[in-house]
């Protein structure tokens, strides 16, 4: 019933409603995004840096102008999300009352509502949207929120500790529960005269009432659309199979058309899902007579023909762009194996992380480098370990920084499946040289090191004659730049776990960014500054395919086997069906996410 009503809503008046929604999406993309980027740029100028990183956050905290610009950015984001979702709600109500709704009317009502809602309560609306970031893939979300996610490295690190993993799961469950209870808040805010606080309170009370619990139909609708999207992808691939494996001009054109059509249908299903869930929510409120007031539909605005032409021109441009980009990739894409593959702490899937066995397994799987972490003992010896306290892997509550080398060296470690022992940096280098594999050495700083420890590390690399082969990196900019002075012949890198804007000012040879902070523009900026760009931690098939497809400089991964599998798929680019698979699996993620 809901899906049928959504279909009628979207096809009424020659899809005018859909055109308005698409138009608002692109207004947000090219309007809100541009303003937010401009504000961020000026924010960074005022704090005297080129990028927003963990290092620059303290400068922002002590700059009133930076705070002001940050508030402006958050307000623009909140208003954009509010405007995007209110467009759908207003369109549904206009349809129910059989009245037309123009973009001008939506603007007028949204601005009027925002003027009334701008108050200290507005912070609750902002927090409501921010709390939705971990669950944006559950269907009812904003275009802006869908671009944000919890960084992978945070969730991966939390999973290594039972207590923190439990806290993270509880956090996700609480977030889901809150959004279930507040699921009517935004429709009430847009379609009624309730304030933000009243909308939240009313939604909380309403979700207790009989007939208001929409989780089951919500999940049912979400499941139907997921099946629909996968069915479209499946049918498009089967259609290409019917064309055969041989590549000809006609077949390439036909496959490009099929791919472009599939992407457009899946985009349509994405919008339809959001509208369908909105119809479900508005229906409940409508039946309970909570949104019967139609004051926002009383005033009618003249519809200017130019606006309709602009909207249809925008829609046509989208279709042409998608078709054009599929044709370009289908005709010209050739995979080149240029991405450096770095095994994160060795092959930590089939051995204990940072162990000799992990090194050996990574060498067998032909990794270009093996990344390891080193810590300094109390008597100035380097141990290969990620954690300062070895309790996680050894069950011994002992810190490397407070221990002598002989007390910590050789201690048994296990990940629950595999068993190994802690080794020195020298032992690791000797084994790596024997296996013929290079190392990426990350300096872990615990704050108790003596002033000459970087010179000590540089001498170790010099003694083993690996200065030109190994790479050294660190999360601490000052440490890595100091080490660069101690070992001028070595390549060094600065790890930037949280990064927005341009690239930081530094003398290092390469930058390492977290996967969620990476984009191709940032890599181009790095190249312009004669720096390489590595990305961590790249572990999913989607992420691996993207970075190999775009020829990112380097990826740090725990999934060496998955990387090799994806490389083989991308290398097999000689048949029509394989070329289609390589291009489609990349474009589906980039254009439809």
Image (cartoon, rainbow, N blue to C red):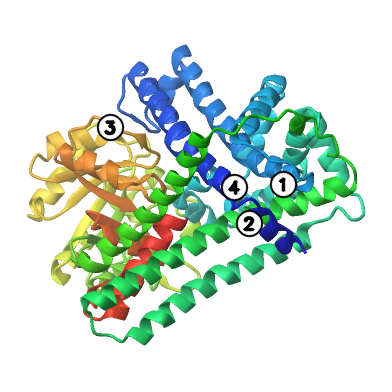
Relative to residue 78, is residue 156 depicted above or below? below
In the picture as drawn, the residue positioned furthest to the right comes out as 210
Is residue 560 something that shows in the picture?
no
Relative to residue 185, is residue 250 depicted above or below? below
Identified at 22% across, 67% down, the residue is 331
Graded by Cα atoms within 10 Å as few (under 14), some (14 to 19) or many (20 or more), the crowding at tag 2 reads: few
- Cα separation, mark 1 vs mark 3, equals 46 Å
Residue position marked by numbered label 4 in the rendering: 16
**Residue 553, position as x, y percentages in the image:** 22, 54
Q: Quadrant of residue 319?
A: bottom left
Q: Look at discs 2 and 1 and give the one toward the viewer.
A: 2
**Residue 271, position as x, y percentages in the image:** 58, 54
Graded by Cα atoms within 10 Å as few (under 14), some (14 to 19) or many (20 or more), the crowding at tag 3 reads: many
Give SS at disc 4.
helix
Mark 3 or mark 2: whose residue is earlier in sequence: 2
Q: Quadrant of the N terminus?
A: bottom right
Specify the label residue 11 is tagged with. Answer: 2
Give SS at disc 3.
loop
- Cα separation, mark 4 vs mark 3, equals 46 Å
Q: Look at discs 3 and 2 and give the one toward the viewer.
A: 2
In-image side of 309 versus 562 (left or right): right
Mark 1 or mark 4: whose residue is earlier in sequence: 4
Residue position marked by numbered label 3 in the rendering: 504
- Cα separation, mark 4 vs mark 2, equals 8 Å
- Cα separation, mark 3 vs mark 2, equals 49 Å
Identified at 59% across, 30% down, the residue is 79
Q: Look at discs 1 and 3 and give the one toward the viewer.
A: 1
Identified at 43% across, 82% down, the residue is 238
- Cα separation, mark 1 vs mark 4, equals 12 Å
Q: Quick check: marks 1 and 4 in contact, CB under 8 Å? A: no
Specify the label residue 92 is tagged with. Answer: 1
């Amino acid at each position: 019933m809901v899906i049928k009503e959504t279909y009628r809503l979207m096809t009424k008046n020659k899809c005018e409603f859909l055109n308005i929604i698409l138009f608002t999406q692109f207004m947000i993309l090219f309007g809100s995004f541009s303003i937010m980027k401009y504000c961020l740029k000026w924010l960074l100028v005022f704090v005297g840096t080129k990028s927003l990183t963990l290092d620059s956050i303290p400068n922002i905290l002590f700059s009133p102008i930076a705070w002001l610009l940050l508030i402006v950015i958050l307000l623009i984001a909140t208003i954009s999300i509010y405007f995007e979702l209110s467009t759908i709600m207003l369109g549904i109500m206009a349809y129910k009352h059989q009245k037309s709704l123009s973009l001008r009317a939506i603007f007028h009502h949204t601005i009027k509502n925002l003027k009334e809602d701008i108050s200290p309560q507005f912070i609750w609306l902002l927090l409501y949207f921010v709390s939705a970031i971990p669950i944006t893939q559950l269907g009812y979300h904003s275009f802006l929120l869908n671009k944000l996610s919890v960084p992978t490295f945070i969730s991966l690190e939390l999973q290594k500790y039972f207590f923190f993993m439990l806290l993270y799961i509880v956090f996700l469950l609480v977030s889901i529960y809150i959004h279930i209870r507040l699921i009517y808040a935004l429709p009430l805010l847009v379609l009624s005269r309730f304030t933000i606080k009243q909308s939240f309170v009313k939604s909380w009370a309403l979700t207790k009432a009989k007939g208001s619990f929409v989780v089951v139909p919500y999940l049912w609708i979400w499941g139907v659309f997921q099946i629909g999207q996968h069915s479209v992808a499946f049918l498009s691939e089967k259609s290409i199979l019917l064309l055969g494996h041989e590549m000809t001009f006609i077949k390439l054109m036909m496959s490009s058309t099929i791919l472009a059509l599939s992407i457009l249908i899946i985009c349509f299903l994405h919008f339809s899902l959001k509208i369908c869930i909105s119809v479900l929510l508005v229906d409940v409120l409508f039946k309970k007579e909570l949104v019967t007031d139609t004051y926002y539909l009383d005033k009618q605005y003249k519809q200017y023909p130019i606006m309709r032409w602009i909207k249809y021109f925008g829609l046509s441009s989208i279709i042409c762009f998608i078709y054009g980009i599929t044709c370009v990739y289908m005709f010209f894409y050739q995979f080149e194996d240029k991405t450096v593959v770095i095994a994160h702490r060795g092959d930590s899937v089939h051995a204990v992380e940072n162990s000799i066995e992990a090194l050996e397994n990574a060498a067998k799987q032909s990794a270009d480098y093996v990344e390891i972490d080193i810590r300094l003992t109390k008597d100035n010896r380097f141990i290969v370990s990620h954690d300062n306290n070895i309790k996680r892997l050894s069950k011994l509550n002992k810190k490397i920084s407070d221990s002598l080398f002989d007390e910590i060296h050789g201690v048994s470690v296990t990940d629950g499946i595999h068993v190994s022992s802690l080794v020195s940096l020298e032992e690791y280098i000797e084994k790596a040289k024997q296996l013929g594999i290079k190392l990426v050495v990350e300096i872990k700083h615990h704050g108790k090191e003596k002033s000459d420890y970087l010179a000590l590390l540089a001498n170790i690399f010099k003694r083993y004659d690996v200065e030109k082969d190994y790479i050294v990196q660190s999360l601490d900019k000052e440490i890595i730049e100091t080490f660069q002075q101690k070992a001028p012949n070595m390549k060094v890198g600065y790890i930037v776990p949280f990064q927005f804007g341009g690239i930081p000012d530094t003398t290092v040879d390469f930058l390492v960014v977290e996967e969620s902070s990476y984009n191709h523009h940032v890599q181009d900026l790095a190249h312009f500054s004669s720096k390489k760009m590595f990305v961590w931690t790249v572990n999913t098939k989607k992420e691996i395919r993207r970075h190999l497809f775009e020829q990112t400089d380097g990826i740090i991964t725990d999934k060496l086997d998955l990387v090799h599998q994806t490389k083989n798929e991308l290398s097999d680019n000689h048949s029509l069906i394989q070329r289609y698979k390589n291009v489609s699996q990349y474009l589906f993620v980039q254009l439809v996410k």
